[in-house]
Amino acid sequence: MPNIDLIIQNAHVVTFDPARATTGDGAIAIDAGVIVDIGTTADINSRWTARERIFADGKIAIPGLTDAHLHTGQTLMRGLLSTLGARKALRIPTWREYLVPFEAALSYDDVELSGLLAYTSMLQTGTTSFFEAGGPHPEAMAAAAETTGIRGAVSLSTMDGGERIPGSMVDSAEHALARNIEVVEKFPAAADGSARVTGGMSLRQIISCTPELIVDIHREASKRGVKVHTHLVEGTYEIDFTLERYGKRPVDYLIDLGVFDETLHGAHSILADPDDVDKYAAHGVSAAHCAKGNYGIGAPPALAMWRRGVKIGLGTDGVAGLGTLDLFRVAMLARIGQQFIYGTSVHNRNAVQPHEPLDMAIVGGARAMGISSHTGSLEIGKRADIVLIATDGPDAAGYASEEAFLYECASGRDVHTVLVDGQTVVKDREVRTADVGEIRAKATKRQQTLMDVLD
């Protein structure tokens, strides 16, 4: 029998593949970071031998989750806005008055520390891939991702205009384009998905980017086969901006510019109307539903997008507001919010199917990030990004089936073991690739200094 790197055995395997296949007492065979076989434990052991084995003891094996909209550079802001808001009224809009100025104050070392803190937390709660929204020092994000072992696409916060934006965060269109190209070329993708950390391109949002920059970034991203991450239809101010200047809503404005296609990733998409949703589906634009904050702005059509075939994932939006990076919790918020929007008003108690929010976080996130040929399901030939969910916690007691627990109640605190590219990065709930205690101590100390930026 062939001798391979690793077998995970005695697991309840939930593949999230198109057939929604599950296997009780299942096993996953892994070699060179790739899944080479899936079946029952008996079948896998009859076909392969392995240099290492993980005995899952009935834990649930699922694909890793993907955070489809993350702000790494805001990680040291965890709790700062609510702390500041307890002392005085916060200025609005938050993104311009606090988020961007905070990012402008960060050094390379600050961003690397932010990445170490964020990515270890994400791995411990089952997230194996992240899609960076764009921030300062993307090279520092990449260094942190390499250290921790997470999969991610990093990018630069890109603006060449806008009012009351710190000067260090605004660039000329020519230099901004060059820097975006530099990031992509410094961290190239691999056809087989083996490059864990890759570079992408970013545009902060329509109101801070000129039409020329938007078109140029899109052109160069399309040439290189990478995505452009932006905030889209996120607030009323954005819609008013394009109506006032161009006589049309943001989606139609981008269609006229020729950039509204599969290259574009529109985070939030809260105020997309039904016609916009149709255009997302028709043009292949992806989206991210950030359930922690979206419902404070509007009624995001995440479920409608999902069922129309839009490549929509779930995002944490970082930790500046509601500081968790646990995508299981975000999925629960998405379920409650979408149920209220699409079910409550018409007395439909089951508007959202139990599996749909987690499907968005796993399958949808990989699609939105453009990596679904390598991740997002447990299938032969895909990268071995795998999470083992323990079923011995208080919330798992008495559940009729593993799937019912997984879809209804599992959270990041149930994550026991995490593999990325077949390498164990979390074992017994502890990160193996970095000293989490040291990272947290450094972050706490540095956060106190950075608090002055917001005051």
Image (cartoon, rainbow, N blue to C red):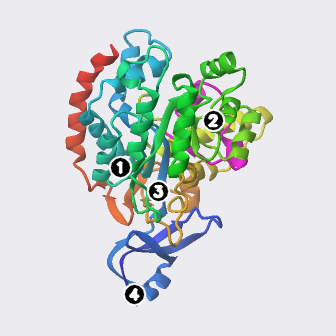
| Image mark for residue 319 | none
The residue under label 2 is 337
Question: Looking at the image, is mark 2 or mark 4 nearer the viewer?
Answer: 4
Query: Which circle, 1 or 3, is nearer the viewer?
Result: 1
Mark 4 residue element: loop
Classify 78 as above or below 362.
above
Q: Is residue 150 above or below residue 218?
A: below
What residue did someone put label 3 on? 64
Toward the front, the furthest residue is 174
Q: Quadrant of the N terminus?
A: bottom left
Q: Residues within 10 Å of mark 4 (few under 14, many from 20)?
A: few
Q: At 39% across and 25% down in the image, what residue appears?
A: 169
Of callouts 4 and 1, the N-terminal one: 4
Q: Residues within 10 Å of mark 3 (few under 14, many from 20)?
A: many
Q: CA separation, marks 1 and 3?
A: 26 Å
Disc 4 or disc 1, which is closer to the eye?
Answer: 1
Q: Which residue is under mark 4?
A: 2
Magenta extent: 291-316
**Is mark 4 in CB contact (under 8 Å) with mark 1?**
no
In space, the residues marked 2 and 4 are separated at their CA atoms by 49 Å
Give the amino acid type for the residue marked by disc 3 in the picture: Gly
Name the residue rendered at 57%, 53% in the picture.
Answer: 367
